[in-house]
Amino acid sequence: MPILLFACMIFLFAIDVPIAIAIGVSSVLALIFKSDLSVMVAVQRMYAGTDSFPLMAVPLFMFAGALMEAGGISRRIVNLADSMVGWMTGGLASVAIVSAMFFAGISGSAAADTAAVGSILIPAMVNKGYDRDFAGAVQAAGGSIGVIIPPSIPMIIFGFLTGASIGRLFAAGILPGILMGLSLVVVVILISGKREYGGRKKFSLKNFIDSLYSAVWALGAPVIILGGILGGVFTATESAAVAVVYALIVGLLIHKEMQLRDLPRIFIDSAVMSSVIMFIIASASIFSWFLAIEQIPKLITGFLVGITSNRIVLLLLINAILLIAGTFVETTASLILLVPVILPILPNLGIGMVQLGTIVVVNLAIGMLTPPLGICLIVSCSIAQNRLSEISRAIVPFLIVLIVDLLIITFWSPITTTLPDLLLPVR
């Protein structure tokens, strides 16, 4: 029966059926041919898979991110980043990375991060003489940090699947996100220096102070979101609701760049994006349930442990599986399909649940930069008006440095455990 399930799903993927439908149809067909189970089980599992308080944070964070983008927060963040690093070699490209890091603390979505910042900076880079493929690659690479620096929708889903503390997962993503951002800035500087990108300008303290003052309300969002969660004031879901209210107040009353008439469009766009994610979660929950009753995770665990008992080799194997999956399968689906398989191996890996969650999300974030399903790459390609093949070649140096970062995150546990243990110690 599992063979039928996988064969059907691979066939549907190959003919370009949407991921949620491919997973759902394959799972229902497997249930039909397994005669002792009713097809109504599929409906029950779809409902149960989305009936979760933590998952309410997903549409709320997406709505908050859309509100903040419409309320002028993106532009103020870009201006602040420009005042900080715009004077460097390849200044605008560095601004793209730093802006993405700031916006990551607001949106929780890599695609939203890439689109919000890229719509401003990719055309600006092209106008300043940067190659289109490089500009698109830089923004895609920076956008991938959107799911590492909290809040993070994939980390919320990982916490939902495993029962891990979402607050500790958020805290664990801060230092890896900063590491990835700084590494990308180094790559940008090296490439820009070689290609003579970007004019030199002097750092202006006055410009920095003015930009910081203008961006105070924009920076208040991640402070409230993270401060509330890490301080134990509210849960991740409650923080998402607070972020929505904050974004409304800032956009309508403080920045005054958003009008009441804009809200229906923003709400509908956010609802559509959220429904896609929730549909994937609902379909994938049938799939993961079916795998569980067929004891597939146990079989895969036995197979991997049978290959080697060396924790380093096991970690490398898991990273390889996740990187390949992230290349071909959407992030939410990858989480729901693979986490139940990886979880039983955790005792053999010598790491904690929070570090495993960070490793999984970083792998899938890198997958957002690889064709054919790299969402950050596709968004950047659309904004840059360039061919996917050209941006795919330009992304290679960034992929290399991010894989090095992944190995650091995998094998040096303090980078993921220090802040959770300091801010949210397990009692």
Image (cartoon, grey):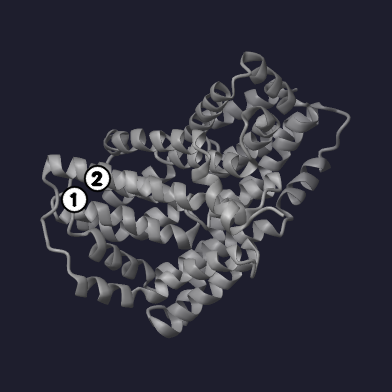
Q: Nearer the viewer, residue 14 or 139?
A: 139
Residue at left 32%, top 77%?
214
Tag on residue 188?
2
In-image side of 380 versus 347 (left or right): left
Which residue is farthest right? 36
Q: Residue 348: horizontal and vertical position, in percent?
A: 66, 27
* Residue 392 visible, this angle: no
The amino acid type of the residue labelled 2 equals: Val
Q: Residue 32: horizontal and vertical position, in percent?
A: 79, 31
Measured along the vertical axis of the image, is residue 84 above or below residue 17?
below
Which residue position is annotated with label 1? 90
The amino acid type of the residue labelled 1 equals: Gly
In-image side of 53 versus 95 (left or right): right
In-image side of 215 versus 22 (left or right): left
Q: How many dots with numbers?
A: 2
Quadrant that contains the N terminus: top right
SS category of the residue bearing label 2? helix
Q: Residue 10: horizontal and vertical position, in percent?
A: 58, 27
Q: Residue 340: horizontal and vertical position, in percent?
A: 68, 35
* Residue 137 visible, this angle: yes
**Residue 389, located in which quarter of the rendered image?**
top left
How far apart in space, not on screen, are marks 2 and 1 (Cα)? 7 Å
**Residue 120, located in which quarter of the rendered image?**
bottom left
Q: Nearer the viewer, residue 409 or 112?
A: 409
Contact check, label 2 and label 1, Cβ < 8 Å: yes
